Image (tube, helix red, strand yellow):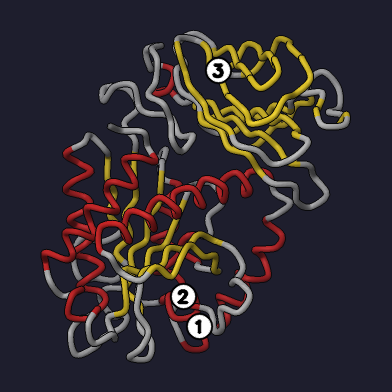
Amino acid sequence: MRLFLLVSGLTVLLGTSAVAAPRVGTHTGFTRVVFALPKTTTASVKVSGQTATVNLGLSLSAERGALNALGITGYAVTGRTVTLTLAKGHGQAKASVLPAAGGQPARLVIDVPTGAAAARVPARPAASPAAGVPRPVSRQAARPRVVLDPGHGGNDSGMASAWVREADVNLAVSLMVRQELVKRGVDVVMTRSSDRHLHADKRKDLDLRSRLATTGTVSAFVSIHTNASGPGAQGIETFYFGQPLAGQGRSTAVFENGGGAVGEALTRSLTNSAQGMLGDLLAQAKLSFSRQLAQQVQSNLIRATGAVSRGVRTDAFYVISNPTTPAVLIELGFGSHPVEGPKLAQPAYQQRLAGAITKALLAFLNIK
């Protein structure tokens, strides 16, 4: 459920600055504060005591006022700094900048968790957040939760080559990531922990996996896959939800969405809906955080393995299309490649992949 309130009148653009009266939205589990910006910029957030401070790469017109919203009591804008006063017991916040789209200007989006666990967080300074996502202050209070989705399994083995079977590689790497995250106090939910499917029907199987991203408070959803193509194709790529990029050819999502007529139909439907998401504020914020996570995952994987980087891309994957959770899909490499395929079968190489994914997730969650 969403309830948007307009605070202190309409936001008006003035030259290179903006009158920053925010919109405030109350959602299940968090309160969202949105400031209009004259253009896209950088933003970093720090929480100290009852104050969340966002430093911007541009200046805004001075503005301040009270806010009667769950978890927040007031705001102030001074030049390059936007400050939220948090309600007693609330000590988390995350920030992201959305580019102008759908007739809307660029926006600064600040989310303040308001669930029962968030209200129990003791007020204390948080670590410097490289990705704009709050670090949990204590393990006794809100533990971050990550959903790991080893793609395929059971009646769907995914790609298969002379060296590897996709379902096996995906599961092995996912279990290694889970082991490392649990050591660091992260609550990990697995869509599968053995060679099985969630439903015999592929669309229902994908739906069941996706739904786990909205069970409780989930910090990130990561779907892990192995690629296949002609013998010359190699490299790692990381996706977040969106339309296939121009020149990408036949969508990678067709295969991961079930292949054949099922994959074609599902991908076509999702591709059409991707454009509509640009006008949805909640979806845009999710996509912005998903892009940040995808960039961290991709850079860590390439650094750890030395593999060819195929970059960060968008595509219409069903399993990461839910608009409420930062979500990415990783293609670990090409099991069909004569060099990369044998590597993907090696436990030592799988551990390097898992270590890189773990490191990216911990950075995204600001867990040192």
Quarter of image, res 340: bottom left
Q: Amino acid at mark 2?
A: Asn
Residue 360 lies left or right of residue 288; in this view the side is left
Q: Which residue is mark 2?
A: 257
Quarter of image, res 30: top right
Q: Which residue is mark 3?
A: 71
Q: How far is the residue under mark 1 from the one under mark 2? A: 7 Å
Q: How far is the residue under mark 3 from the one under mark 2? A: 39 Å
Residue 336's place in the image compared with 197, above or below, is below
Question: Quick one: label 1, few (<14), some, or many (20+) residues within 10 Å?
Answer: some
Q: Residue at x 37, y 84 (%)?
A: 233
Question: Quick one: label 2, few (<14), some, or many (20+) residues within 10 Å?
Answer: many
Residue 107 lies left or right of residue 86; in this view the side is right
Q: Which residue is mark 1?
A: 262
In what element is the residue under mark 2? loop
- Image x and y of residue 297, in percent: 37, 54
